[in-house]
Image (cartoon, rainbow, N blue to C red):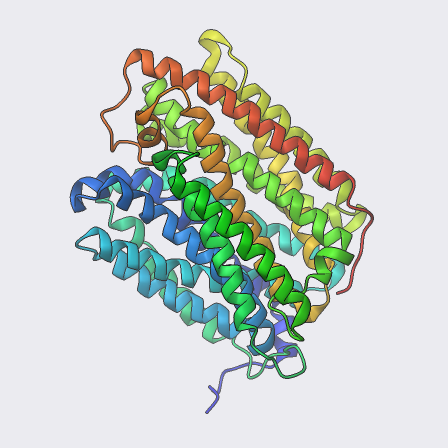
Amino acid sequence: MPWPHRITVDELQDRRWAVLALTSVGAFMGPLDGSIVNVALPSMSADLRLSFGEAIWVQAVYLLTMAILLIPLGRLADRRGRMHFYLGGIALFTAASVASALSVDGAMLIVGRALQGAGAALLVSTSAAIVTAIFPPQQRGRALGINVMAVYIGLSVGPPLGGFLVGAAGWRWIFLVNVPIGLAVLAWGSFLLPREERVARGAMRPDFLGALLLAAFLTFLLVPLSFAPQWGWSSPETVALLVVSGLALAGFVLVEHRVTDPVLDLDLLRHNRLFTAANLAALFNYMALFGPMVLTAIYLQEVQGRSPAVTGLLLLSQPVLQALLSPFAGRLSDRIGSRVLTTGGMALMTVGLILLATPDGNSDTVRLVVGLSIMGIGLGVFSSPNASAIMGSVGRHQLGLASGFLATTRVTGQALSVALLGAVAASQLGALGARVIFAPGDGPGLSVAAAERFAAGYKLAMAVGAGFAVLAAVASLVRGGRREEG
């Protein structure tokens, strides 16, 4: 029996700003728990006696689970109702947070993190789709600007917030803090849940083989990228898994061309130039962003000797500027289109990363903060216009798919960024390098000579990140004009 207070679809659109606020909470929570764990790993490792491999899995299983489920769940939400899936994600994420906080060993924590990743996949695959569906095209950029701002804030404030919570209350509170938020969102969302939702027409034929091959491709890609610093890039395990990933991708493409209701309509990539190029720009953007965030936090503590609290404050310049600019950039993209903004944003991102890569003697900290600030401005200009372009380039029946695809791009970009830029930064540290990058605090720490070698590797990694930002700018520039299929 439907709840008496459930509203109609038209009433839901009338309350679209309240729905935007509701979905932005989920857009914030998913990325936040992908980044907040980094700072807490040393405390977790000591308390639960995690091995180095378990510490990596605590980080990797969350992103891996998200990556596997995002596109299939987004596709399913288009057919079954996005608001219902979103609130289901909140419930699962909240319950998994409790399980993670109560963990007594590494295995229990890894399972809890996997369940958190499944809940986050439900949130992230539906959040932008819900916003796109209920806002008219002339307000879409502004609304998605706020929603995307929440995503980037979650990514950016995770390390400083994690440092504060670990220092003040212990590592378990990085999970427990989700519980009151989740319960409040569930109560709030129940008043915005429509009696029925407009969903894609036609009976859905589950593409189980396509979903399985997509999962295999992402699993055998992300696992070796996460463990290559420990195994070695040329080790048999790394090479074999990457080869299997390539074979799974080839099989996925063949299957998707043959089934009548594919989990991913490849015509989106082949015939929708804007969708393809904007997602490619997003991939390079995340490759340029996520690794430098992690590496700069390590650089400030291991090389400059900053405390976690001071490190968190220094890192805040980037997310604060981005948060201030994202809604404005989204509104501006409604008027002038997104290509100029996204290209210019990635150009600024390049400048910021070049500053991080340039030695500057005693003014090193000032250079870092200025570089991070310019990165924040560039991200604020890029992120919401790019998301608006992606979501506006597909039909309403594909909004969940587009949202899930963009989120998969983000998760894959994060994994690639940490693996590739982390390997570059740690390249001169030998076996110690992997521990410094992927489980800071788990190893013996850095000597003065090792800190100098890491500093050199860090600057080289920032230069590589600047190259990814250039590729993102090029993808934005060549993607073609504006296209709306609202």
Please provide percent x and percent y for residue 110: 29, 54
**Depth check: 51 or 310 in front?**
51
Is 202 drawn above or below residue 371 in the view shown? below
Please provide percent x and percent y for residue 373: 55, 28
Q: Residue at x 26, y 54 (%)?
A: 109
Is 196 drawn above or below residue 219 in the view shown? below
**Depth check: 191 or 157 in front?**
157
| Residue 23 makes an appearance in the image | no
| Residue 206 makes an appearance in the image | yes
Outermost residue toward the bottom in this view? 1
**Depth check: 64 or 103 in front?**
64
Residue 374 occupies quadrant: top right
Please provide percent x and percent y for residue 99: 26, 61
Residue 442 horizontal side relative to residue 9, left or right: left
Residue 123 horizontal side relative to residue 376, left or right: left
**Depth check: 465 or 181 in front?**
465
The quarter of the image holding the C terminus is bottom right
Residue 246 horizontal side relative to residue 184, left or right: right
Q: How many marks?
A: 0
Q: Residue at x 48, y 46 (%)?
A: 242
